[in-house]
Amino acid sequence: MDKRSLRRTDHEFTEMYERNIDTVYRLCYVLLKNTVDADDAVQSVFLKLYHYGGAFHDREHEKAWLIVTARNTCKDVLKSWWRSRRVDMDVLPEKTYWHNDENQGDVLEKLLRLPEKYKTVLYLYYMEGYSIREMSQILDRKESTLQTQLAKGRERLRMDIGGMYGDGKSSPGAIQSTGAPKST
């Protein structure tokens, strides 16, 4: 049996790539905070997909597999020897093609500074539209844990964004406060 016959055709792979490249890239960018590492991670994820011999039940299963693979690949990059021994210049992330306006760039900057557990949950919920139940299956975490992380992540982001404008007034892209007093 020809080894190539067990894999997807080039056309099928191209369709999968085009369907999912934006999601995988944005997730890698959110987790790694720079375009160079995100590009490398995306390439690794799709190389893994190319060599993956399993079948997907539907497009949601395919997307979930890619999200989990992307997250794991990014974790591997973050704990790699090279990354732990290089000096971080602590510069703002470069603007990429998916920034629509200045406020979104400010919000993204604040999102990237959150701990991984908050930014992943916020990203999947707001950017990709996953429900708590779906994220629970993808991330292998309890729904209650995800609800807590989502609430705490929102509050941290709200405080960061509120502090960014300093005058207490709401900005066009800011998350609206519920009126509860802020704790310092």
Image (cartoon, rainbow, N blue to C red):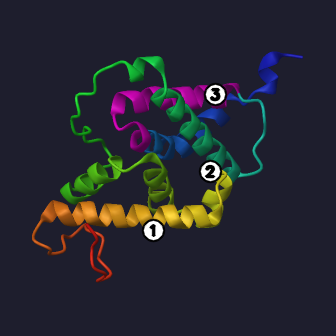
Residues drawn in magenta: 29-51
Which residue is at 41% across, 48% downward? 115
Q: State which quarter of the image contains the N terminus.
A: top right
Return the x and y of residue 182 as percentages of the image width and height.
27, 73
Q: State which quarter of the image contains the C terminus.
A: bottom left
Q: Are marks 2 and 1 in contact (CB under 8 Å)?
A: no
Indicate which disc residue 48 carries: 3
Return the x and y of residue 71 as percentages of the image width and height.
55, 40
Q: Earlier in the sequence, mark 2 or mark 1?
A: 2
Q: Are marks 3 and 1 in contact (CB under 8 Å)?
A: no
Return the x and y of residue 180 as percentages of the image width and height.
31, 81
Q: Is 20 contained in the magenta span?
A: no
- Quadrant of the rendered image containing residue 97: top left
Q: Which residue is mark 1?
A: 151
Q: Which residue is mark 2?
A: 139
Kindly report the distance in space between the C-alpha atoms of the residues bearing marks 2 and 1: 17 Å
Amino acid type for the residue under numbered disc 3:
Lys
Whether 167 is drawn above or below 117: the answer is: below
Q: Is 48 contained in the magenta span?
A: yes
Kindly report the distance in space between the C-alpha atoms of the residues bearing marks 3 and 1: 34 Å
- For the residue pair 91 and 41, the one nearer the viewer reads as 91
Q: Are marks 3 and 2 in contact (CB under 8 Å)?
A: no
